[in-house]
Amino acid sequence: MSLSTEVILSLGIPIGLIVLGRVAGKRIERKHYESIAERERAFAAKPAFSARDAMLVRPIADARLATGSVVVSVDHFKRFIAGFRMLVGGELGSYAPLIERARREAVLRMKESEPRADAYINTRLETSTISNASQNEGTGTIEVLAYATAVRFEPLQNGRLPGS
Amino acid sequence: MILTNIETVPGKRIARHLGLVQGSTIRAKHVGRDFAASLKNIVGGELKGYTELLQESRAEATQRMVAQAEKLGANAVVNVRFTTSSVAQGASEILAYGTAVLVVEAG
């Protein structure tokens, strides 16, 4: 193999992957945000609270555990940018959208797992790093788990709270 | 079996506490999924294979916790918590724990 072919291979593949990561990663991110925004609108009337007792004035008829989780990975371009960032320290801005997407997705899946609930109380978010044998330990692959108690209210009686 | 992650079951009264119950599972990824994930790593986004794997594991851990609660004669588990820890390269433990209780209709 000539020197130039070797140079092209050894430089071309990583650069190709970075470019592919940039182009496809951007597209996937945009589509994911659109999907999140649309589904969040559908669930806008069914809030998730982090409080245990979210000032719910209506009596609860039914409660059950709802969970939702997602594993996401950062793309090659962002990993490359982060590599530079780590030389000087500071905030890794390129990773922020990924984690935000994962959290919003996990909360949405939690809601979708109990779609008949009226509210989700005591919502907890857990983030854990997934180690990956083919990469360095846990390179930008995370799991986000959201869980909460999904509650359904007692139906209104003639538009009034029961017992009032 | 009613599961909640708050201290009570709304609309019901806790008659007896039956103690801590837990269920866990340790799962390893298989090679096929790992390979698919390494390709997906280039463009980023969701790794569906891993999402499913962890969901199955969590369901398994929850099932074991529920089985333990049933043995104690409970009809609900309150204050359920989930944790994940990696025990070895490529393997993670998923733990579900909570307090087994006997609930009765309030009032």
Image (cartoon, rainbow, N blue to C red):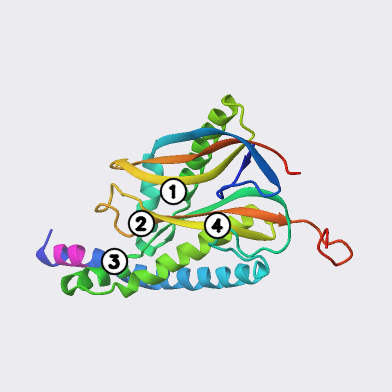
Magenta span has A149? Answer: no
- Residue A84 in the image: above or below residue B85: below
> Which residue is most to the top?
B71
Query: In whole angstroms, how far apart are the C-alphas of marks 4 and 2?
Result: 26 Å
What is the distance, in whole Å, between disc 4 and disc 3 at their CAs? Answer: 34 Å
Q: Quadrant of residue A12?
A: bottom left
**x, y percentage for residue B6?**
56, 50
For label 2, the residue is A141
Q: Find out whether the residues at labels 2 and 3 contact each other: C-beta distance under 8 Å.
A: no
Q: Chain of mark 4?
A: A
Residue A122 is marked as 4
Disc sitting over residue A79 in the figure: 3
Image location (x, y in percent) of residue A52:
56, 58
Q: Looking at the image, which is closer to me, A28 or A100?
A: A100
- Residues at marks 4 and 1, CA–CA distance in whole angstroms: 26 Å
Q: Determine the chain carrying the residue at label 2.
A: A
Q: Which mark is residue B50?
A: 1
Callout 4 and callout 3 share a chain: yes
